[in-house]
Amino acid sequence: MQGTMMHTPLSLNHLLERAGRLFAGNEIVSRLPDKSLRRHGYGEYYRRTRALAAALRGLGLRKGDRVATLCWNHHAHLECYFGIPAAGGVMHTLNLRLAPQELGWIAADAQDRFLVVDDVLLPLYRQFAHLHRFERVVVFPFSGAPVPAEHADYEALLAAADPDSFEYVAHQEDDPVAMCYTSGTTGRPKGVVYSHRSTVLHTLVASLGDFWGLRGTDVVLPVTPMFHANSWGMPYGAVMMGVKLVFPGPHLHPEDLLDLVQQEPPTLSLGVPTIWMGLIHTFEAAQTPGAPNHGRWKLPRGMRSLVGGAAVPESLIRAFDRHGIWILQGWGMTETSPVCTISYPRAELRDADADERFRRAAMAGVPVPLVDLRVRGGDGADQPWDGTSVGEIHVRGPFITGSYHNVPADPEKFTDDGWLRTGDVASVDALGFVKISDRTKDLIKSGGEWISSVDLENAIMAHPAVAEAAVIAIPHEKWGERPLACVVVKPGQSAELEQLNAHLLEHGFARWQLPDRYEFIDAVPRTSTGKFWKVKLRERFPR
Amino acid sequence: MQGTMMHTPLSLNHLLERAGRLFAGNEIVSRLPDKSLRRHGYGEYYRRTRALAAALRGLGLRKGDRVATLCWNHHAHLECYFGIPAAGGVMHTLNLRLAPQELGWIAADAQDRFLVVDDVLLPLYRQFAHLHRFERVVVFPFSGAPVPAEHADYEALLAAADPDSFEYVAHQEDDPVAMCYTSGTTGRPKGVVYSHRSTVLHTLVASLGDFWGLRGTDVVLPVTPMFHANSWGMPYGAVMMGVKLVFPGPHLHPEDLLDLVQQEPPTLSLGVPTIWMGLIHTFEAAQTPGAPNHGRWKLPRGMRSLVGGAAVPESLIRAFDRHGIWILQGWGMTETSPVCTISYPRAELRDADADERFRRAAMAGVPVPLVDLRVRGGDGADQPWDGTSVGEIHVRGPFITGSYHNVPADPEKFTDDGWLRTGDVASVDALGFVKISDRTKDLIKSGGEWISSVDLENAIMAHPAVAEAAVIAIPHEKWGERPLACVVVKPGQSAELEQLNAHLLEHGFARWQLPDRYEFIDAVPRTSTGKFWKVKLRERFPR
């Protein structure tokens, strides 16, 4: 057979060219630090992005060089998403929620050569500047203030560059375009490197009808930071389909987001559960006549809301559903680009009642195309998809990382037969819905039997006096490990061991599964991405 | 940078595994020759397809061997789509509308080793069996009649095979999975070879929200034959998303299709314009009280209808719109997998009036992601996207053929810089909408000026007395070429040169563009895919 298809490499440059040609008039809106809105079309976006690429080449960027970004969600950050790869560079998003020491360590580990930083984040940059020397620091004048003379001015660089004569740096489809560090709930953060190929494939898969369902008529509000797994990949999908984008900038408080939603009503939004919990509470509090902000906001009926990064409580899904907003839960990791599973309305559940629909919506969802998923039991065998057998999730596919930057091959993370060990413990049911029950590191092995810390936490948090609960394992001479519950009590409430354990017994736990000890704390420590940071609790309560 | 993504090859086998796991209960429905419906779930589909693959291995199929199919649209043909590649083979769909000599030539050119044929199509097979010897002929007992003893029985082979122990034949993503011959309106048919990679990428792109918008809750009716550019790729998308499929089998008459639509109402259908013209005429004729079949049918409101293969008249789009059905026009070729452009509602046209929306819907549409498209003028320069400048469409991308089976590199088909010359003449407007105006071979060059045969045909067909018109070039001593119009007059009507040319002048044509001659014929000859077959007219009217 001599006939073949063309060997055209997958490329972000193609998507950028496409957007410049087809979607010149579609808007990209950014909220600035002073809360005013800047708006321009994809035509200007295209020219600015190519000007950025030309400017980076002018600064001496070589193929494969890392360019760090330390930015909020806005149009210039989107320019970095395509402009840095267009110039042959690798965009490395720095997480502005991290401690300065950690940022310095990460920038050094990635060997970042240049930095693009929001002017409003220069104070943070100065706290880790001594830990890693960027050759060039390019300041984006997000606030409009003059750029300090010792740094390059993003806007001046773009104005001086020529987008028309810029030529894309040649590449293979496996060449890197972006990198992002894991949140490091256990151990050092590790760098994940995305390629043209993996990014284009992830974008195509995640954009499909049952998942993001992206259409050119969508108005997308990405609240998920662009430094969290590339805003879950949405910026790439938005440019591919030419959707209107509304970037919230640094204003992520519920009142700010509700104001923005009035100005530019979205049809699709994305963010972690904490964001939406705050938003619905603020909104509902304003519904009472006479309450502050009464009548100020409407919720955008018909909006889809992609929620991930942590488990979404069913109560939150129901709360939004009452306002005509459908929450689509997804699960994934920095290592997986990140979309691995999404919970969507299945044909098989067309006649299911509301309870069943909500129960499924509160699960992690169904594996998307190109992702292979298996659940491995403690004996190393694949667990059946019966909705009850649990094991560790392994995933494999063309947008899942096969190795970390600067980290030797690690059998703790990758299996011999080429799968990523996610560290998440789950069951899968007959329809393919994944239900995460725990992290492998958070399971408690007591007398040879597993106790799920997540199940205990959920049950304890259902007690009316409890605001938050995190359960960890502590060593035990006889049983190996036993559960310790760290509990945050609601203001004005109290709770004690007998009372909480009685509550757990009522909820179906066996006596041997109950915590032997409760510690009452002020707050559960959280990682920069909002997850329970159990490492910190284990340090505080080593036994 | 040492971090890399996994090198997992794109593969149809992954999509098959996914469907078997996730969509076991979703239905595949086939209409049998006796018009009864057979239905089973993707679970059975999965087992049958793997059994087919195991059986083909058992028959001695080697990697890369071609397995021809000569089948209507039904569940067994869908099994071939995935089962033949799973066994390492290449599915070669034979077009049952072709003349037996042509089928024999094509089977020999493809060196087909095996054949899967519907029992009801054995009479056709026997007409070309002497032209190419298939090593094994496997008969699918579509009608339920016993299979002749000299052939293998598809169902018996499946029953004897073991799907559980079958192992996929290892492959690279560029390995071939299917081939299809061009319709050969000019010259010999040529074999186009699709790979795992090209097929998966085409499936992902075409399934996106603005194009097919495939969702698992869809019910898809593929009227487009599975031997026309793989039913435009829909079978792959259907399996990827687990949609309910309704195959019409051999029953494609308007009344049959309308009956099927009552039984299994689709949300998405696909077919050439001729099919939908017949359907709407039959349906509307039945609306008159007292007419035959009055009250027998309802049209499925809300259905999307993908139409391609030939230009879709605006009147057809409007006719369906009145019944709540939206026609999405696409353009492509066997060489392009086939989806290159689709006309969809653009955000920029949200406030456009109905006339503007219908005008756009009647265009070929906007290039889809991964397809590069340019329009080359006669001087070899790219034409601007201004809606008026015309030239030949060139396309490039990972699901566009780079070479034909058994055909040496041909500069008539491929440019030096790696684009496919489509032979279609078009303009593109500022929103990226492509408007096909002609085939390069159908343009008429008169006194150094081009005359569009398609424009003349459309205007002549707008005359009330005319049913069909096809315009060809005839040689002329002075002008080089001049237009000749071949016209089919409606029953009971008449027309002549003066009258038709006066009509054309009213429609804005210049005097020098008018046909010098009209030939009144009984019917315009058509190719097996329903296109005007101008080669035949040129043979009949050489001067």
Image: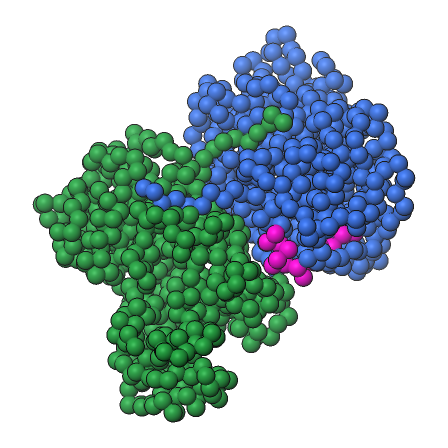
Chain colours: A green, B blue
Q: Which residues are magenta?
A: B17-31
Q: Nearer the viewer, residue B417 or A2?
A: A2
Q: Position of residue A203 (x, y in %)?
A: 45, 49
Image vertical order of residue B340 relative to residue B513, above or below: below
Residue occupying image coordinates x 17% and y 41%:
A135
Image vertical order of residue B540 relative to residue B394, above or below: above
Q: What quarter of the picture does the N terminus of chain A occupy?
A: top right
Q: Position of residue A274 (x, y in %)?
A: 35, 70
Q: Position of residue A246 (x, y in %)?
A: 35, 56
The verdict on residue B27 being magenta is yes
Image vertical order of residue B246 relative to residue A54, above or below: below
Left or right of A90 in this view: B527: right
The verdict on residue A30 being magenta is no
Q: Give the number of callouts.
A: 0
Extreme top residue here? B477
The picture quadrant where one finds residue B335 is: top right
Image vertical order of residue A309 relative to residue B78, above or below: below
Residue occupying image coordinates x 38% and y 38%:
A175
Inspect this view and state whether residue A271 appears.
yes
Q: What quarter of the picture does the C terminus of chain A occupy?
A: bottom left
Residue occupying image coordinates x 13% and y 48%:
A147
Inspect this view and state whether residue A211 appears.
no
Residue occupying image coordinates x 47% and y 70%:
A437
